Amino acid sequence: MPEVVLPPMPFGSDLALTALFLGAKEGLEVDYHNESSLTLARADIKPFIWKHGVVETLKSLGCGERMGMPLIPGGAGGTDGYVLGEKLKVWQGGLGERERKNLFEALLNFLMGSDFPEGLDPGSVSISRGRNLDIKVGGDIDPPRLVISDALYELGKFHGIKETRAGRPSMGRVRISISAPYSALLYASLLAFQVAFRGGDHPIYTFMTLHAEPGTELWSLGMIKEAFSNLLKFTRKQGSVIYEDPEAYRLALIYRILGRYAGKIEAFSEERCSIKITSFSKSAKRFFRVSEIPIALSEVPSVARAMESVGLREVEDIASALSSLIIASMHLISLSENPTPYEALMVSLKSLARAMMEANLRVALDETYGIFRRLDVEEVRLRMIGKSADVEGDFLSVEGREVKREELFREMRERVMNLKRVITRSV
């Protein structure tokens, strides 16, 4: 049973785990390696088949479009340009759309032609301790700057630990290095799992990954893979609007998962796995973590049970309508010259979402009446239903289904108007 040591960096570990999980065919275990105290992933699969599964899955997700590349360019040491151009020889520079796609394809080809995941088991780890700490996982290549910046930021700021000996006196130096195939995997995963980008003086890069603590065994691979892939592609389509209200987007995704898997959601109950949406800001040659939105998969069936406990039986319809309305409000707040009606709707929609999670029917009823008082205004109602149809079209398109907008508009109008009937009928 092949084992792969996860890089000892929080975000790097999540990137690697997500790629390895998506490439596995059956169950996957996350565990500690006692000797090194590092985390590893283990799967009952032949190494070549695992590698092929990882590459094909990343290829199917693609590398996104119209998003800034999360890289530090340049040819000097300590940059992504140096690793990609001089060490891996897969990049000639450039940060445009064509260069992004070419880099992504070159990384996947490099990975496919390597011996990955062999040579990354616990025996490949070398740890040198002293005043300085050197950790090598299979090689001597620097990890992506985003990954290493995130891992060492707090060590440097609060404990005097640095990557180099240069500068003011420090408590010591930390160096984490990995093999060339592992580096290719992390760079390809950065591009594949990126879901949003916002430019400016301090651009923000956002990623969706899976997270599991050591001691976790994941078995619902098919459902988790499908849910993760759909949510990733769906989130890419929403663009920078997800930055406007992260908590609202978190609620929308919980209800979207519930609406999609309502009939078999209990399969998530025992899965100790989370979907994370993590954002980083770039400044000079470093990245800084600015936010993290966690969605525990085991939380979703508990929402279904809470709704059913107060008589809300049509879980799928309620969840789907609520998710679409929340995201529609986010878009209209961003697009409208007068966002006030949609901001008021958002307050009520979030309160309704939380009330159903807590099985608080009284608050759910109050917020439902408030929502529909605002939807009595024809312009607000038509724009909300129209944008909800667009949102639902985005969701269906990532599943490979195309539906005419007119049909979606009619369906969303019926679903939205049905929301009030379903909730008030439970009293």
Image: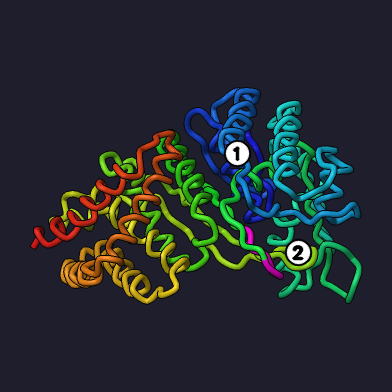
Q: What element carries label 2?
A: strand
Of the residues shown, which amino acid type is indicated by label 2? Answer: Arg
Residue 45 left/right relative to 258: right
Question: Which residue lies at the image location 58% right of the left edge and 55% below the top edge?
Answer: 196
The residue lying toward the viewer, choosing from 351 and 47, is: 351
The residue lying toward the viewer, choosing from 111 and 130, is: 111
Of the residues shown, which amino acid type is indicated by label 1? Answer: Gly
Q: Main secondary structure of the magenta part?
A: loop
Q: Name the residue under label 1.
A: 62
Residue 66 appears anywhere in the view: yes
| Structural distance between the alpha carbons of marks 1 and 2 | 25 Å
Q: Mark 2 points at which residue?
A: 286
Question: Which residue lies at the image location 90% right of the left edge and 66% below the top edge?
Answer: 165
Residue 140 appears anywhere in the view: no
Chain part drawn in magenta:
200-205
x and y, in percent, of residue 319 in the image: 28, 53
Q: In which quarter of the image is residue 222?
A: top left
x and y, in percent, of residue 277 in the image: 53, 56
Residue 202 painted magenta:
yes
x and y, in percent, of residue 339 in the image: 40, 73
Q: What element carries label 1?
A: loop
Number of callouts: 2
Mark 1 neighbour class, 10 Å CA radius: few under 14, some 14 to 19, many 20 or more: some
Residue 280 left/right relative to 343: right
Question: Which residue lies at the image location 55% right of the left edge and 49% below the top edge?
Answer: 209
